[in-house]
């Protein structure tokens, strides 16, 4: 059985930055920072965290919108999607990338983590996983349809660990070409 709950990621001076921590049945395992889509650490992301915990990972899903709205939990409907895009527009992605690095460092420091730490992100979270990989603080990274990476290629040379990118061929939100020939 897994256990999962919200934890604080910074000191008492910054009590609003939290993350959803899911522990595997064994209680220990390698670490995985799971980075949300624009709908927040919603029910879907919490379920994904629990699934990875069932697979043996200690999973931490940081709340990257915490500066605007804590513990964002939006559905995939039109009204909530409008809210999600407004939150994205108000987010400094470089700062959110630093928050992901803070989450990585926090996860590494937990006694339940026995091994390497990876980061995996979806869409906006995919770009934040890319940024985290560029920090050098993670052992491996995965980006699923990471939007905006093409606008931050200057970070690519800083990535020294394995990184996997997943993109759908017909995704209308991700450019098929970067405009570089």
Image (spheres, rainbow, N blue to C red):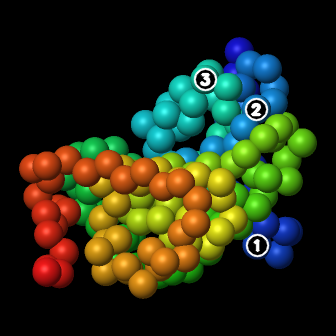
Tell which circle, 1 or 3, labels the residue nearer the N-terminal end.
Answer: 1
What residue is at 49 percent from the left and 77 percent from the top? 157
What residue is at 38 percent from the left and 80 percent from the top? 152
- Say whether residue 60 is left or right of residue 42: right
Q: Secondary structure at mark 1?
A: loop
**Is residue 125 visible in the rendered structure shown here?**
yes
**Is residue 35 visible in the rendered structure shown here?**
no
Nearer to the camera, 34 or 115:
115
Nearer to the camera, 152 or 75:
152
The image position of residue 52, as x and y in percent, is 57, 30
Most distant residue in the top direction: 1
Nearer to the camera, 74 or 167:
167
Tell which circle, 2 or 1, labels the residue nearer the N-terminal end.
Answer: 1
Tell which circle, 3 or 2, labels the residue nearer the N-terminal end.
Answer: 2
The numbered disc on residue 14 is 1
Image quadrant in which you'd find residue 135? bottom right
The image position of residue 42, as x and y in percent, is 46, 44
Distance from the alpha carbon under mark 3 to that under mark 2 = 9 Å
Q: Residues within 10 Å of mark 2 (few under 14, many from 20)?
A: many
The image position of residue 80, as x and y in percent, is 29, 54
Distance from the alpha carbon under mark 2 to that under mark 1 = 28 Å
- Which residue carries the number 2 mark? 29
The image position of residue 118, as x and y in percent, is 62, 49
Please name which of the two marks, 1 or 3, marks the residue nearer to the observer: 3
What residue is at 54 percent from the left and 26 percent from the top? 51
Q: Residues within 10 Å of mark 1 (few under 14, many from 20)?
A: few
Q: Quadrant of the N terminus?
A: top right
- Which residue carries the number 3 mark? 55
Most distant residue in the bottom direction: 154
């Amino acid at each position: 059985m897994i256990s999962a709950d919200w934890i604080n990621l910074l000191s008492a001076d910054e009590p609003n930055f939290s993350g959803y921590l899911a522990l595997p049945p064994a209680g220990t395992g390698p670490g995985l920072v799971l980075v949300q889509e624009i709908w927040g650490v919603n029910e879907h992301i919490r379920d994904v965290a629990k699934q990875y915990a069932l697979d043996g990972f200690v999973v931490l899903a940081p709340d990257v919108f915490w500066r605007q709205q804590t513990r964002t939990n939006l559905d995939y409907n039109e009204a909530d999607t409008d809210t999600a895009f407004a939150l994205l527009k108000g987010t400094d992605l470089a700062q959110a990338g630093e928050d992901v690095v803070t989450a990585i460092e926090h996860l590494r420091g937990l006694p339940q983590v026995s091994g390497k730490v990876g980061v995996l992100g979806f869409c906006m979270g995919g770009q934040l996983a890319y940024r985290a990989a560029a920090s050098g603080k993670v052992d491996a990274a995965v980006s699923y349809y990471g939007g905006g990476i093409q606008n931050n290629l200057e970070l690519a040379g800083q990535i020294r660990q394995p990184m996997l990118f997943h993109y759908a061929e017909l995704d209308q939100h991700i450019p098929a070409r970067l405009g570089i020939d």
